[in-house]
Image (cartoon, grey):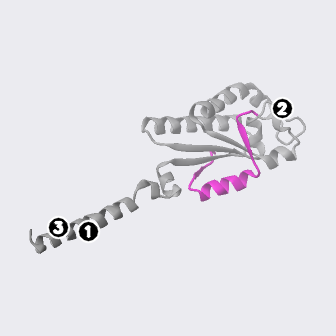
């Protein structure tokens, strides 16, 4: 074998080696967590209202969204952040003597709304997050909240942080 053939073979092998280094340096393990999350649909719903019909419409919207994402094999992270009047939907307490006191319409629909909301949590892992400022300002004990609800220090701060992390903001009107 001539030296020219050996040199040519070595050059090709060296280029193949460098090409493999480049390919492996771009492997999925090296991709940041942020870019991996690009394939996850992230949505935050803001609940600061008292109207049970509006809350029902929101639950329907979330259910439709979850159904679509599941049918299309799209990963998702959906959060519901409850602030102020939204606290009415995460407890069975009547909140007597507070600005958020349950009215007859809420009491009539509470079991249905609770069941639908907790089903979204249990079946589809929709996260339920309550502003702890709201809870503490009215003196509601944490054990009065549904067990599936997580407390966040501030609901509006949580919403802002989630938006910063790429969550789309939705508020049902």
* Measured Cα–Cα span from mark 1 to mark 2: 75 Å
- Residue 153 shown in magenta: yes
Nearest the camera: 73 or 53?
Answer: 73
Counting labels gives 3
Of callouts 1 and 2, the N-terminal one? 1
Foreground residue among 135 and 61:
135
Question: Is there a contact, CB below 8 Å, between mark 1 and mark 2?
Answer: no
Assign a secondary structure to mark 3: helix
- Mark 1 Cα-neighbour bin, 10 Å: few <14, some 14–19, many ≥20: few
In this rendering, position of residue 82 left or right of residue 9: right
The residue at 55%/35% (across/down) is 63
Give me the residue at 90% from left, 38% from top.
Answer: 97
Label located before the other in sequence (1 or 3): 3
Q: Which residues are magenta?
A: 146-173
- Would you say 169 lies left or right of 83 here? left
**Taking 61 as reference, is 155 above or below it?**
below
Q: Nearer the viewer, mark 2 or mark 3?
A: 3
Kindly identify which residue carries mark 2.
94
């Amino acid at each position: 074998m001539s030296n020219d053939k050996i040199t040519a073979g070595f050059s090709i092998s060296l280029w193949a080696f460098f090409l493999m280094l480049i390919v492996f340096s771009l492997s999925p393990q090296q991709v940041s967590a942020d870019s991996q999350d690009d394939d996850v649909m992230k949505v935050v719903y803001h609940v600061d209202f008292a109207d049970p019909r509006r809350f029902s419409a929101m639950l329907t919207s979330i259910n439709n969204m979850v159904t679509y994402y599941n049918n299309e094999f799209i990963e998702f992270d959906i959060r519901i952040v409850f602030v102020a009047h939204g606290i009415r939907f995460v407890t069975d307490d009547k909140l007597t003597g507070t600005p958020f006191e349950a009215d007859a319409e809420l009491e009539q629909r509470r079991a249905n709304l609770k069941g639908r909301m907790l089903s979204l949590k249990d079946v589809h892992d929709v996260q339920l997050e309550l502003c702890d400022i709201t809870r503490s300002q009215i003196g509601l004990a944490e054990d009065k909240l549904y067990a599936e609800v997580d407390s966040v220090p501030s609901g509006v701060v949580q919403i802002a942080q989630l938006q910063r992390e790429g969550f789309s903001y939705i508020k049902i009107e």
